[in-house]
Image (cartoon, helix red, strand yellow):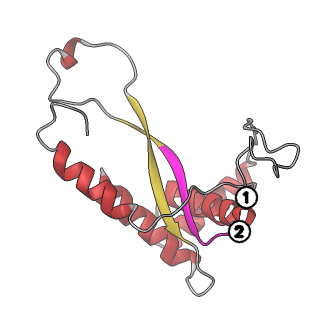
Amino acid sequence: ATDGDPQASGARDAWRDLLAGLTEPTLASGVSPDHPDARPGTEPGRIVVRVPEAVTTQLHTCATAHGATLNSVVTAAVALVTGYHAGTTDVVIGTTVAGRPGHLVGIDETIGLFLNTVPVRVDMSPTRSVAAAMASIGEQRVAMM
């Protein structure tokens, strides 16, 4: 929600509710890079992975079998790995979304990308199935957008 958006107040409340009870960020290394206990190699970086076609096919099969999207499958996997390295089951990761704020004057004449990074909160408790996590990711995406 942006300033001037008539739905901004409701959106802020929804995001506040989603993140209620969160006491700290999800840090994959356990501490921020500038913390005295930070291990070497915990600086922000970029990792490029090429996923083989066979793996992509398996991911699509998994998504279809669980009534999920490929995005929900990958988001659950990222949350699982991030939570493991962060030592938490209450995982918050960022995801990029696109959208033009329709309430802005002149938006129909504006050229360019309109991207935002929004939080995705995932409960990766050991008693919870990955299928349940994938379902909640999809439900959260629909509810928050």
- Look at the image and say whether residue 93 sits in the magenta stretch: yes
Q: Which residue is mark 1?
A: 30
Is 138 situated above or below 45? below
Q: Residues within 10 Å of mark 1 (few under 14, many from 20)?
A: many
**Position in image of residue 94 (x %, y %):** 52, 47
**Which three-letter amino acid code belongs to the residue tagged 2?**
Gly
Mark 1 falls on what kind of element? Answer: loop
The region drawn magenta spans: 87-95
- The kind of residue tagged 1 is Gly
Horizontal relation, residue 108 to residue 25: left or right: left
Q: Is residue 106 magenta?
A: no
Q: Which residue is mark 2?
A: 87
Return the x and y of residue 59 as percentages of the image width and height: 62, 61
Position in image of residue 4 (x %, y %): 15, 31
Occupied quadrant, residue 15: bottom left
Whether residue 109 sits left or right of residue 89 in the image: it is left
Q: Position of residue 91 (x, y in %)?
A: 56, 63
